[in-house]
């Protein structure tokens, strides 16, 4: 197991290194380079640009800049924003809790509802419920997230006035219930696509498992159908479902960006669009690395969980 973990950690470190190199290279290859905010501004003189280059160390060779930036990311010195001079680490980490709250709640909701719908669809194969869940999943997967967000705001915020249209809390902060009300619509919209995918994968996995001999044997022994379903069927279907959860992390991060924008949720997604408009590359690079770290960590945890569920996975590394 130790060799399995070391192997996965090394792969994750190499992946993060590759993301950082590609992101840093793209930042320098973009029109105007890292100082596009100044070089594309006709009111900024050449002398001012040279002074800014020296101030931020951009007059040095690119590989030296990268090594200094990478060392700073590892040690916690993420540099300063080109737009305001604030520490990048403070700007980004202030937004992380809001994004994690949105993503974590949406993922938990999607797991519970998606697995439940998938199990019921498998048990009631070719029933009205099965067909209805299939149609609902196709609709959820076919339409873009921002469309569901706008529809939810129009229906539940503007027409029915049941829930707030955006933000993380009312003016003045608000209490727990106020924050919960602001969380409901973004979470539902973000979880919708995940529920559709989870329900279809759970249904397929359960149908495959329920048709196997060991499940028939358990039924023949007179074991209760609910125990056969949960202890034999769902347990055997967990491996592909956990793997799917790891693969859905990038989809979740991308969906959070769109959802935060639609609902003015003050997380990393809104920050990303804000600094993208101002071309604040130090903040963009930090957001890129934090997002990549979330994806790598999610996949790593999924791999470890799969190894615990199915020991055959780690045997190849032990």
Image: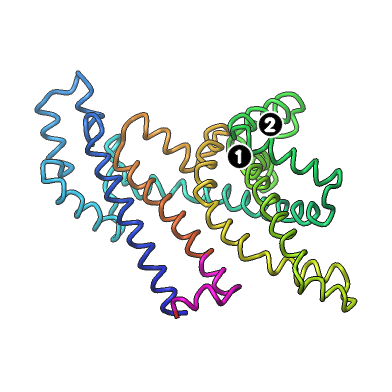
Residue at screen point 70% across, 24% down: 158
Quadrant assignment for the C terminus: bottom left
Figure colour scheme? rainbow
Indicate whether 51 appears above or below 130. Answer: above
Magenta stretch: give its range. Answer: 303-317
Residue at screen point 80% across, 46% down: 130
Q: Is residue 304 magenta?
A: yes
Q: Is residue 190 left or right of residue 207?
A: left
Q: What is the CA distance from the residue labelled 1 to the residue labelled 2?
A: 18 Å
* Label 1 crowd bin: few (<14), some (14–19), many (20+), radius 10 Å: some
Q: Is residue 30 magenta?
A: no
Residue 131 circle label: none
Report which residue position mark 2 lands on.
152
* Label 2 crowd bin: few (<14), some (14–19), many (20+), radius 10 Å: some
Residue at screen point 50% across, 46% down: 253
Report which residue position mark 1 lands on.
169
Say which of 237 and 273 sits in front.
237
SS assignment at label 2: helix
Indicate whether 244 appears above or below 301. Answer: above
Q: Specify the quadrant of the image occupied by residue 246.
A: bottom right
Q: Is residue 190 left or right of residue 135?
A: left
Q: Nearer the viewer, mark 1 or mark 2?
A: 2
Q: Earlier in the sequence, mark 1 or mark 2?
A: 2
Q: Are marks 1 and 2 in contact (CB under 8 Å)?
A: no
Q: Position of residue 37 (x, y in %)?
A: 26, 29
Q: Position of residue 166 (x, y in %)?
A: 60, 33
The prevailing secondary structure element of the residues shown in magenta is helix
Q: Is residue 14 left or right of residue 315?
A: left
Q: Position of residue 38 (x, y in %)?
A: 21, 28
SS assignment at label 1: loop
Indicate whether 33 appears above or below 231. Answer: above
């Amino acid at each position: 197991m130790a060799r399995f973990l070391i192997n996965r950690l090394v792969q994750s470190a190499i992946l993060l290194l590759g993301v950082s190199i590609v992101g840093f290279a793209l930042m320098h290859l973009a029109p105007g380079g890292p100082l596009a905010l100044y070089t594309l501004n006709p009111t900024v003189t050449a002398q001012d640009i040279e002074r800014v280059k020296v101030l931020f160390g951009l007059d040095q060779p690119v590989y030296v800049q990268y090594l200094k930036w990478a060392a700073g990311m590892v040690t916690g010195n993420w540099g300063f924003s080109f737009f305001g001079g604030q520490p990048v680490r403070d700007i980004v980490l202030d937004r992380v809790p809001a994004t994690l709250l949105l993503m974590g709640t949406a993922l938990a909701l999607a797991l519970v509802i998606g697995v439940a719908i998938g199990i019921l669809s498998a048990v009631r194969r070719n029933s009205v419920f099965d067909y209805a869940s299939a149609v609902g999943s196709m609709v959820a997967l076919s339409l873009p997230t921002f469309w569901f967000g706008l529809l939810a705001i129009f229906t539940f915020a503007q027409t029915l006035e049941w829930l707030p249209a955006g933000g993380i809390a009312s003016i003045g902060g608000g209490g727990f219930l106020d924050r919960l009300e602001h969380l409901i619509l973004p979470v539902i919209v973000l979880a919708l696509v995940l529920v559709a995918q989870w329900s279809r994968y759970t249904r397929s996995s359960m149908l495959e498992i329920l048709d196997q001999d060991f499940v028939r044997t358990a039924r023949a022994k007179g074991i209760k159908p609910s125990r056969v379903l949960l202890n034999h069927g769902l347990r055997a279907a967990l491996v592909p479902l956990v793997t799917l959860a790891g693969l859905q992390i990038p989809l979740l991060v991308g969906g959070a960006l769109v959802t935060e924008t639609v609902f003015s949720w003050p997380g990393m997604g809104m920050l990303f669009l804000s600094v993208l408009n101002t071309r604040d590359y130090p903040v963009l690079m930090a957001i890129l690395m934090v997002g990549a770290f979330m994806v790598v960590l999610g996949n790593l945890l999924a791999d470890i969980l799969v190894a615990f569920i199915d020991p055959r996975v780690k045997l190849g590394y032990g």
